[in-house]
Image: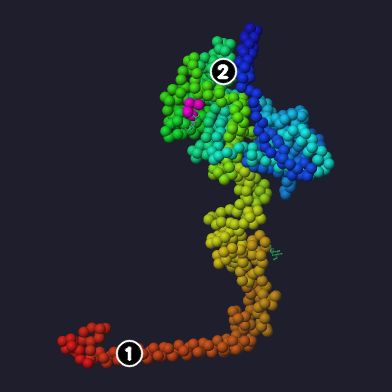
Amino acid sequence: MEKMKRMKGLRIALLAAAVMLAVELVSGNFVVEENSLAVMSPESLKGTYRSAIGNFGVPKYGGTLSGVVIYPTVNMKGCGKFPHDHFRSNSGERPKFALIDRGDCYFATKVWNAQQAGAAAVLVVDNRDEDLITMNSPEEDPVASKYLPNISIPSALIIKKFGDKLKTALSNKELVAIKLDWREAMPHPDERVEYEFWTNSNDECGPKCDDQVEFVRNFKGVAQILERGGYTQFTPHYITWFCPQAFIESKQCKAQCINNGRYCAPDPELDFTRGYDGKQVVTENLRQLCVFKVANESLPRQPWKWWDYVTDFQIRCRMKDNRYGPECAEEVMKSLSIDVDAVRKCIGDPNADADNEILKHQQDVQVGEGVRGDVTILPTLVINQRQYRGKLDKTAVLKAICAGYLETTDPPICLSDTIETNECADNNGGCWERGSITACKDTFRGRVCECPLVHGVQFEGDGYTHCEAHGLGRCKVQNGGCWEETRLGVYHSACSDYHHHGCHCPLGFEGNASKVEGGCVDIDECARKLKCQCPDCKCTNTWGSYECECANDLLYFHEHDTCINRKSGQSKAAGWVVSLIVLAGLSVLGLGSYVVYKYRLRTYMDSEIRAIMAQYMPLDSQGEVQNHSHNGVREP
Ligand SMILES: *[C@@H]1O[C@H](CO)[C@@H](O)[C@H](O)[C@H]1NC(C)=O
Ligand SMILES: *[C@@H]1O[C@H](CO)[C@@H](O)[C@H](O)[C@H]1NC(C)=O
Ligand SMILES: *[C@@H]1O[C@H](CO)[C@@H](O)[C@H](O)[C@H]1NC(C)=O
């Protein structure tokens, strides 16, 4: 028993030595990714500063965020919970950034505590004089792993000197306003984004492996759209260690490595006596690389098949189900029409004491080059040669990829709903809205206020305070934003296609006509003495109009707002108007009669003449009248 324990201890030590030696050879070049931080006020601190993007939460790649800085008076290190809503901004206020000191607990814990109290971002002040460092996420911490995926705000580390200046300004009761800027955090040299995902086929390493599996599954759709559209060039990578020469003959290296110690992966359970060995993991890694290579070189090229293979393999060939291995892998390949023979050929013989081109390349590119650091931790995402910082989450990663394009060359997916930042959820992002119609659009660059196109009707305006429908059909969309009302079956509207824009109160109404500004109100023609002012007339206001009853059995003549006598057509008030009308009527009648008379006379005469003439000669209209003809020769 004792001996076994010692043996196991020795094994682990050997394993650790092997891994450490391998790590040592490639480590020491971890690049800090930065975003810019601009102080807007106070005047004395105005300027741009450097800050380091935290490796958790969601950096707003491609965007900016402005806010005011709050330094808590207690719990300055943010290791305990803050009072409820301590950093939450009220509506209309700028977002609040929590300024928190480094030390005593994980960076992620501080950020999580501040987020829960409503902070929009966290600035962590370093507690020693040094250059910027990357705030990493805690590894293998069961408590942290619970809240880590829920951190959704960005965080940045600032150097101590700058943090002290901010604190001084705050203690002098000055307003410290800051703009965090991630627009240049991702280079965007051209219209295609190159990105690498460093992963592992091992699915039994706890939360970390689960995260990778989950990410690949969630991101697959987006990755394939981007790749098919030619917007990205994706390359998968797998970290591969080698066994130091002195240990090649050891049991450990034999269990963990292929090609005579050249390519190794750690044992999934860190126990060589049970379950799967590192050897099997490195072989599957190689297979996945080969699947990519074969699919990338097939005709037509289909590099996106890697995503299908990997997700299907994760579902169908799990270690848990004892299905991890070549048989299951080849089943998956067959169902995806991947050339199994080509993949086998690419894998080659794992027992051969020879290099494998594919894995050798993986070891070479693992070492950092240019601005990209070494890849030593999994999973690692490298976008346009920059190491991605933030959580491995579909939206966050897509946002970072989208930030890799120049602003006008974004693929459509970057501007679609899938990448929404939910900035429209809060106060409609400060954009114009009317009922269900809104000018707020979530994009990965943050929200934009842009007048919408609704049912073919284009709204125009600044998008912030004002959008208005123009042209035909505008009244069909929320009545063009104009007032409308129905009372007792009578409908009135302030929108009409007669006007190309704007709202206009119908006759009998007045007001701003637009729906939100009070709409139209009935004009009380009677009270205002506008109509029906004849002596003894009875005026009754109605909605949109009025009624007028004349005295003495007279008839109300609406168009002329006057009373007329039913019998003589004489009105008391404006008899002459009616006389004129009657006179005019008579004249028209007279003229008409004359015209009719003349016409009738002519037709009468015509027919008389025709009748007389018809007796002597054939008329076309009457056909041949044989009796009066002489061999076709007409008599006069
Ligand atoms: C994280 O979010 C999930 C889903 O929104 C929720 O179920 C879970 O309780 C959250 N965890 C913590 C620690 O708040
Ligand atoms: C995939 O194919 C493209 C185009 O043929 C090529 O540029 C790229 O290097 C290939 N990637 C790999 C990993 O073979
Ligand atoms: C709308 O009309 C009301 C009164 O009818 C007036 O007080 C208000 O200022 C008007 N609003 C606009 C924007 O004209």
Amino acid on which disc 2 is placed: Phe
User: Picture coordinates of residue 269 (x, y %)?
Assistant: 59, 19
Is the CB–ligand 3 distance for label 1 below 8 Å?
A: no
**In the rendered structure, does residue 318 fall within the stretch colored magenta?**
no
Q: Earlier in the sequence, mark 1 or mark 2?
A: 2
- How many other residues sit within 10 Å of disc 1, few (<14), some (14-19) or many (≥20)? few
Q: Is residue 614 left or right of residue 417?
A: left
Q: Quadrant of the N terminus?
A: top right
Residue 240 in view, yes or no: yes
Q: Residue at x 54, y 55 (%)?
A: 455
Q: Residue at x 62, y 66 (%)?
A: 504
Q: Residue at x 62, y 84 (%)?
A: 563
Amino acid on which disc 1 is placed: Asp
Q: Which residue is mark 2?
A: 242
User: Picture coordinates of residue 631 (x, y %)?
Assistant: 16, 87
Q: Is residue 296 left or right of residue 567?
A: left
Q: Name the image quarter holding residue 132.
A: top right
Name the one closer to the observer, 40 or 396.
Answer: 40
Label 1, label 2: how far apart the Cα atoms are:
122 Å
**In the rendered structure, does residue 289 fall within the stretch colored magenta?**
yes
45 vs 141: above or below: below
Name the mark on residue 606. Answer: 1
Q: Which residues are magenta?
A: 288-293
Residue 80 in view, yes or no: no
What is the secondary structure assignment of the residue under circle 2?
Answer: loop
Q: Quadrant of the C terminus?
A: bottom left
